[in-house]
Amino acid sequence: MAVKLVSSGVLARELGVTVRTVQHWVADGLIEPDARTAGGHARFDVARVRAELLADRPQARPRPGQG
């Protein structure tokens, strides 16, 4: 199955963040585009980016006395 690559705007909408947040993530090296268009616009695989962001998220720890 072919992977559908989307723009920063679509990625932002899918993740519930702003386009500027996606741009910051790219600039900070948190995520990388899967491809770039001939005009230099980034394209992303939503599922891959979501998985990467979730993998980097710290695991919740129970509060003292709750675990």
Image (cartoon, grey):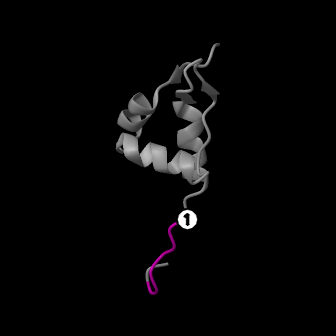
* Quadrant including the N terminus: top right
Q: Is residue 17 above or below residue 28?
A: above
Q: Is residue 43 above or below residue 19?
A: above
Could you say where residue 47 lies in the image, as x and y percent from the top left?
Answer: 55, 33
* Residue lying at the far top of the rendered structure: 1
Q: Nearer the viewer, residue 62 or 18?
A: 18
Q: Amino acid at mark 1?
A: Gln
Magenta span contains residue 34 = no
Residue at horizontal 61 percent and vertical 51 percent from the top: 29
Provide the secondary structure element on which disc 1 rests.
loop
Q: Is residue 39 above or below residue 22?
A: above
Q: Nearer the viewer, residue 62 or 58?
A: 58
* Residue lying at the far front of the rendered structure: 39
Could you say where residue 15 lies in the image, as x and y percent from the top left?
Answer: 41, 40
Which SS does the magenta portion mostly show? loop
Kindly identify which residue carries mark 1.
59
- Residues rendered magenta in the picture: 60-65
Magenta span contains residue 64 = yes
